[in-house]
Image (spheres, rainbow, N blue to C red):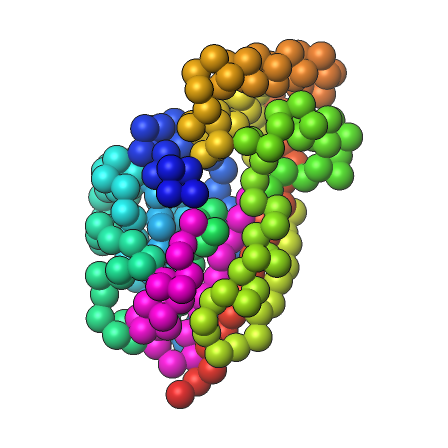
Amino acid sequence: MRDLASSFGAAAAAYAEHRPNCAPAAVRWALEHAPGPRVLDLGAGTGKLTGALGDDVIAVEPDPAMLAELRRELPHVRALAGSAEAIPLPDASVDAVLAGNALHWFDMAIAGPEIARVLASGGVLAGLWNVMGDRVDWVAGLARVRGSAAIGPRDTFSTWRAATHLPGTPEQAEFPHGQRRTADSLVATLATRAGMLVMPESEREATLNRIRGFLASRPETATGEFTLPMLTGVLRIVAARQ
């Protein structure tokens, strides 16, 4: 798990270029009950979510390469080295903690109390995840071809419902989303998945070539641009007021 979580730095520029943003409606839903505007983007990566969180946002990221890319992309944002298990902020200093495609990497036995510490009374914790809309036939076919290493965290909600260490009732929602891609850029996107990044080179290339062949065989993806159907899932907890 640690190897997977630490794999992204080697592909920081590609991650910033190819990974999708979250659906705007999902971000609004995540924040709608926050008691104020102060937002922490925890495990912020290259800032894919950070830029959508308003003017009073702080980003915290443990990987130096990802943090450097975030600072390059969003020079106006306060971006700090740190982790979910050691958040470099004072007690009760933020109104919401959001994690975009990151909450499943946290050691919640340590991170849960840390998040509770930095949240103001009545604050919000929300994890957001982009997953492919595999109810569409060609996307379901792609999921079979690409294998588990390139699949997003479908089991995240059930895994983290009981792991947040916050007094509050978890709520879950999904929001339709999409990303304009070509076959080449979709392959580049899938190549930034943690499971792909830690594969032996020969296995990785074989998997990517299999994906290329599938995309070339489908009329929806063989030529030009297409919309990759997606969902942004949100798990939200509003902490009890103290």
Image location of residue 115, percent across then percent down: 36, 67
Using the image as rendered, state which of residue 215 and residue 205 is in the foreground.
205
Q: Is residue 155 left or right of residue 202?
A: right
Is there any visible trace of residue 222 in the rendered image?
no
Q: From the viewer's perspective, is residue 137 above or below residue 62?
A: above
Look at the image and tell me whether residue 168 can be seen.
Answer: yes
Within the image, what quadrant is residue 96 found in? bottom left
- Viewer-closest of 6 and 64: 6
| Quadrant including the C terminus | bottom left
Horizontal placement of 169 versus 77: left or right?
right
* Residue at image point 64% right, 54% down: 174
Asked whether 104 or 240 is in front, the reply is: 104
Quadrant where the image shows the N terminus: top left
In magenta stretch: residue 29: no
49 is higher (above) or lower (below) than 90: above
Task: Name the residue at 36% across, 62% down.
Answer: 111
Image location of residue 71, percent across then percent down: 24, 42
Is residue 128 found inside the magenta-colored segment of the image?
A: yes
Magenta region, residue range: 105-130
